[in-house]
Amino acid sequence: MNERLGIVVSGSLSKGVEVRLDSSAPIEEMAVGRFVTIEGQKRRFFGMITDVSLGVIDQKLTLTPPDVSDPFIAEVLAGTSTFGIIHVSPQLTIGGDAESLLEGPQPVKTVPSHFSVVNLASQRDVELVFGTEDEKRFFIGTPLDMETKVCLDLDVFVKRSNGVFGKSGTGKTFLTRLLLIGILQKGTAVNLVFDMHSEYGWESQNEQGRKVKALKQLFPSKVAVFTLDEEGSRRRRVSTDFVVRIGYDEIEPEDIALLRQTLNLTEASVQAVYQLAREFGDKRWIEATLGLEEGDETKQLLDKLNIHDSTYRNLRRGLETIRRLPFLVSNAPDNTVRRILEYLDRGTNVILEFGRYTDITAYILVANLLTRRIYARYREATEQAMGGDAMPPRPLMITIEEAHRFLNPEVASQTIFGTIAREMRKYNVTLLVVDQRPSGIDSEVMSQLGTKITCLLDNERDVDSVLAGVINKSEFKSVLSKLESKQQALIFGHAVPVPVVVRTREYGSAKSYKDFIPGEEAEVGKQAEKDIEQLWE
Amino acid sequence: MTEMQRVGEVIEASTTEFTAQCYELYHIPPLGSLVKTRDLPLELYGIVCNAATTSLEPGRRPIARGKDETTEEEIYRSSPQLLKLLKSEFGALVVGHRQGDRLYHHLPPQPARIHSFVYQCSPDEVKEFSQSFDFLNILLNAHLPVPTEELISASLRQMSQAYEDRRAFLVAAGKELAILLSGNLSQLKAILGRIKQ
């Protein structure tokens, strides 16, 4: 049974429609973000409440308020002389006739006629719009005040770069973990996670201090944990698959350019890096530069390269900082990039834990260095596939935290992450950007993100940058700033048909783990069957 | 149909109202109550808006007689002709009519006929008539000998007696009034103050 709210009294397509509430519809229960349906004459519209306000039939009433302590007077005036108004932004047309049932929900191109009846959306309506959980759709949460499942189309999701935003402590990590689980469960892409705070691979604590399992524990066969900090991982009893060591020869001048801000290098120092690399060769330049000793020889070299002494000192200081990173060695025993690619090719998801190296320099250096090479390989593989020689590589999604460090306007054009975000899916590599200061991210990159999932943000600039390019921005602003600080998120973009506020599904209890895993077990079984069949062919 | 209570006879009629004389002195239907005439096939509904008891002859005014009597009843007992020299009349505002089976909440095509009998409506009839509040608009716009808010509140109080849930009826009527009187809040307040329980 539909719950009638009121009737449409005015509005426009660009600004949304105004709905006057019936006296029977309690205004205090009209939360922004709730879904409603509008019964137009020929179509049904599906929309979201974006604002709630109070109206009076005559302004005099506000000047001489009636005696509402008398329940009779209060009851008579409610809904007649005084009434609630909700602002609804219609998003889709659903149902109505047979044709539209076949086509499914369509974007709105018009508004409902005057005095169309507005109802709270029923479970069925919401299901019709968000679909039900299936092979490609992942249940991410429930709409406010409803039990229906909101599902993300992960197939669409992984085709573009996406963003998870929110203030610190609003549940970004939990959301990201949920998304990764979804992608693992449905197998729509392989993941490479640069796990700055070691939260995704192995169990970590939630804010109440309770331990919650992470990906490796839930999907042991599908996840490999790489670590930069072997000792730390051992202390935490993480079963790691690979210890990452990076050789100096793998660091290229571009990597240093990216670290300009964190290493406090001058523009001239960055230019000097390129000159030194030309002089000593791309592989050897760091060791050679660090090996330079005070003396005439060095002075002559610097003169020859036209590098000023202060620039050299500045650069040297920066390189010393890098040298102090223990996972950097002069000769790496194994090729990390190759290892990661091997795992990814097999469909195993890789989580790279940084352990105690939560220093941003390490994070930027490693993430950028690895990603650049992995991207290059993906590019080659995709181009080969275009030539018809091979299968295109599995779609890869790279998760980065503190994304504004890689994607801020100054460096976004130089880093590989900027390229991936802009060129998107051409080479089957996309990003999952996790950040708490979206305003720090280059607006060009932001505009390319397909699906944005955002928890509470209250900084004006952050809200503006997340909502840039959204139609009816001001309406969503009020929705976004009214989110609860826990377990609530606004999702909009490609993977959902309409922007939606969800209470994210539970994560951390034994039951929630079970809900994630049955699919996994079934899949393992299916895979085993397939393998056996192939054996007999 | 149960025997209806006959209260008087039409002695003056126009499209918008009629005046009836009571058969018994002082047996006037209450202010705001619903009455009807039966000029078949047309039945006219009216709301009692005014009443008066006067001398039968306009030139002869009654005089005070009770100086030596102890009670009021004694006066009438000692001068029985008084009952024949005085008359009670009431005016009713026409608010609707019934033609055949249908009830209309607007003015009838013809006014009531003189000498039509006037009946008090039964609670069932009152209920049927008050399913629609369209009559309130006629009351609000009429030129009345009594203040509008007095008549409206009296009629709603009278009608509410036919309902078990009087409050629900009055709230519904109040909401209708709140819409009709959206531009005249002081009148609305006056009426609501008179019908609240």
Image (tube, coloured by chain):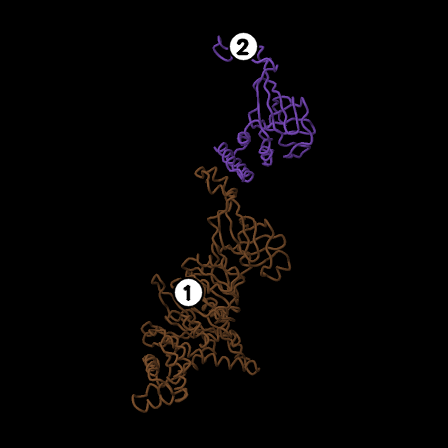
Where's residue A470, x and y in %? Answer: 51, 63
Image disc number at residue B77: 2
Disc 2 marks a residue whose amino acid type is Arg
Marks 2 and 1 sit apart, C-alpha to C-alpha, by: 96 Å
| Above or below, comparing residue B178 to residue A423 in the picture | above
Q: Residues within 10 Å of mark 1 (few under 14, many from 20)?
A: many
Task: Place residue A91 in its image quadrant.
Answer: bottom right
Above or below — where is A54 with respect to A219? above
State which quarter of the image contains the C terminus of chain A. Answer: bottom right
The chain coloured purple in the image: B
- Which x, y percent locates residue B66? 50, 10
Residue A239: where, in percent of width, then height? 37, 74
Q: Position of residue A81 (x, y in %)?
A: 51, 42
Q: Which mark is residue A172?
A: 1
Q: Which chain is brown?
A: A
Q: Count the marks.
A: 2
